[in-house]
Amino acid sequence: MGKLMFLLYFILSVFPADAAENRRHIHVIRRGRKNSHRGDTVAKVWIEEKGQKKIEVAWSELSVTEETEVLKAIDQHWDELNRLIDDVFAGKKIRIKRIK
């Protein structure tokens, strides 16, 4: 799993298998679980379409307030998230960013 950012009590991540998908997306994982993996994902958010910024919720178990905060953070940090995703898929080690 490629952890990108910590946001409140969530981890924004990508998975190596995601590199083959046709749209970039981020998995939102609730922090504090013993094993943070796909089974702990509470939302999936598309962040682009055909290389252009397009943020859409694919599915979510988040409250309206939580979802709003996550989408706002993704929008504000979109360029940086894309750079981090590129680095993860290239096998580079990244520094996980904390945002509030």
Image (tube, rainbow, N blue to C red):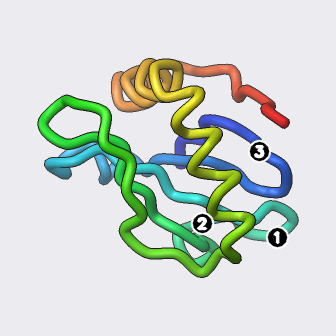
For the C terminus, which image quadrant?
top right
Circles 3 and 2: CB atoms closer than 8 Å: no
| Residue visible at 75% across and 41% down in the picture | 6
* Disc 1/disc 2 C-alpha distance (Å): 9 Å
Residue labelled with disc 1: 34
| Residue visible at 61% across and 43% down in the picture | 72
Determine whether, in the image, residue 85 is placed left or right of residue 38: left
| Residue visible at 60% across and 21% down in the picture | 94
- Front-lying residue, 71 or 8: 71
How dense is the environment of label 1, judged by Cα within 10 Å: few (below 14), some, or many (20 and up)? few
Circles 3 and 1: CB atoms closer than 8 Å: no
Report which quarter residue 89 is drawn in.
Answer: top left
Q: Which of the numbered marks, if any, corresponds to residue 37? A: 2
Residue 90 vertical position relative to residue 54 in the rendered view, above or below:
above
Residue labelled with disc 3: 7
Q: Amino acid at mark 2?
A: His
Residue 79 percent location from the top left of the image: 45, 20
